[in-house]
Amino acid sequence: MKALVYHGPGNKAWEDVPEPVLQDPTDAIVRVETTTICGTDLHILKGDVPAVTDGRILGHEGVGVVTEVGPECRNVAVGDRVIISCISKCMSCDYCKRGLTSHCQTLGGIGWIFGHLIDGTQAELVRVPYADNGLIPLPDGVSAEQGAMLSDILPTGFEIGVLNGAVTEGDVVAVIGAGPVGLAAIMTAASRGAAKVIAVDGNKFRLEESRDFGATDTVDVGAGGDVVEELKKLSRDGLGVDVAIEAVGIPATFATALDSVRPGGHVANVGVHGEPVTLPIERDWINNLTITTGLVNATTAPELLGEITAGRIDPGKFVTHRFTFDQMLEAYDTFARAADEHAIKVIISRES
Ligand code: NAD
Ligand code: ZN
């Protein structure tokens, strides 16, 4: 079969590899119909994620059809159309039972994240360990493109941004960074009843798009204004927003998030940071701030699926570009130039 294989920093190839086989009785094999590319794949390709080694098949998002199941699979059967969650999990270790499935202990270290310590979804076939827990049936009426957004992007914005930030009805929420992850936070904060959702970015295309995802206001960081003051002006009492969600991953935007929340407010860090941030704990203490961060667990996909079938959200909006499997490298080129290409998510689908 063909797969997108990582060959060390800066090197990848769409090449022939052996087909995956069932290894454990709880495994399934899925024929991938649709996959997509995440910013994390670009981090891996740069060599920023040392755990990913030469020969690893990349990708952790996708939708497909189950072609084989191990004898202990109970919830999935051959022929099922499924969303492949970016993380599979045993659901019996202490971490899984507490909802921290990204740290499932059965693999040692971090959990069963596709395209990291196990082969991923940018391939014609993928082996899914603990298939009962890592595959979610795709209901009729939900498209493969919508489903693929539930593998990672939407749960990330929702779990690490909106739920960790404790967004409640009537809140004023600032989302700093309107890339795919920020837009996912905007979409789910709006559907949760936030009174105002403010998109903060310097990319005019993304700021415009953010309104279609539910942003009520935008702040352009390139316009030369004082971003913190603008956010405070948009808040309920002028003292700051209720929740600031950081979806960039640099010290400056983390500082903006801390500076723009009101006393008692929440800062939910989603961004992956390559360097330490400054945490003025003496000020944050007296302001009773709650600061959260973390790796997605992707446990909320079924809940988000309910939001789609109820017509409250449409993650099909993320898809700006479409490719076929044999255009995998072209899809990567487009995604790597996402800002210039006006790309949000690129979808790569099997030809037939
Ligand atoms: P992205 O690079 O596509 O988007 C980032 C956005 O931030 C861009 O639109 C960019 O214009 C904007 N930006 C850059 N500098 C800015 C500034 N100074 N002020 C305001 N906006 C600015 O990234 P993404 O795929 O949307 O991911 C966002 C972050 O979330 C990344 O750090 C990514 O690694 C992280 N992430 C975290 C998890 C998790 O589990 N916590 C999962 C996936 C991704
Ligand atoms: Zn576990």
Image (spheres, rainbow, N blue to C red):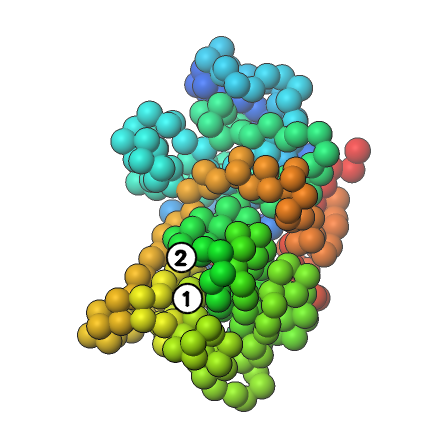
Image location (x, y in percent) of residue 244: 43, 66
Image location (x, y in percent) of residue 331: 68, 53
Residue at 54% x, 72% y: name it. 200
Residue at the far right: name it.
352
> Looking at the image, do the residues carrying marks 1 and 2 touch, with CB atoms under 8 Å apart?
no
Q: Which residue lies under the disc numbered 1? A: 242
Element under label 2? loop
Image location (x, y in percent) of residue 292: 33, 57
Mark 1: give few (<14), some (14-19) or many (20+) Cα within 10 Å.
many
Relative depth, front residue between 256 and 106: 256
Name the amino acid type tagged 1. Asp
Residue at the far top: name it.
71
Mark 1 or mark 2, which is nearer to you?
Answer: 1
Above or below: residue 156 compared with residue 173: above
> In the picture, which quadrant includes the N terminus?
top right
Q: Which residue lies under the disc numbered 2? A: 165
Residue at 49% x, 30% y: name it. 134
Residue 350, image quadrant: top right
Relative depth, front residue between 125 and 169: 169
Q: Who comes first in sequence, dot 1 or dot 2?
A: 2
Element under label 1? strand
Relative depth, front residue between 160 and 66: 160
Residue 64 visible within the image: yes
Above or below: residue 221 compared with residue 241: below
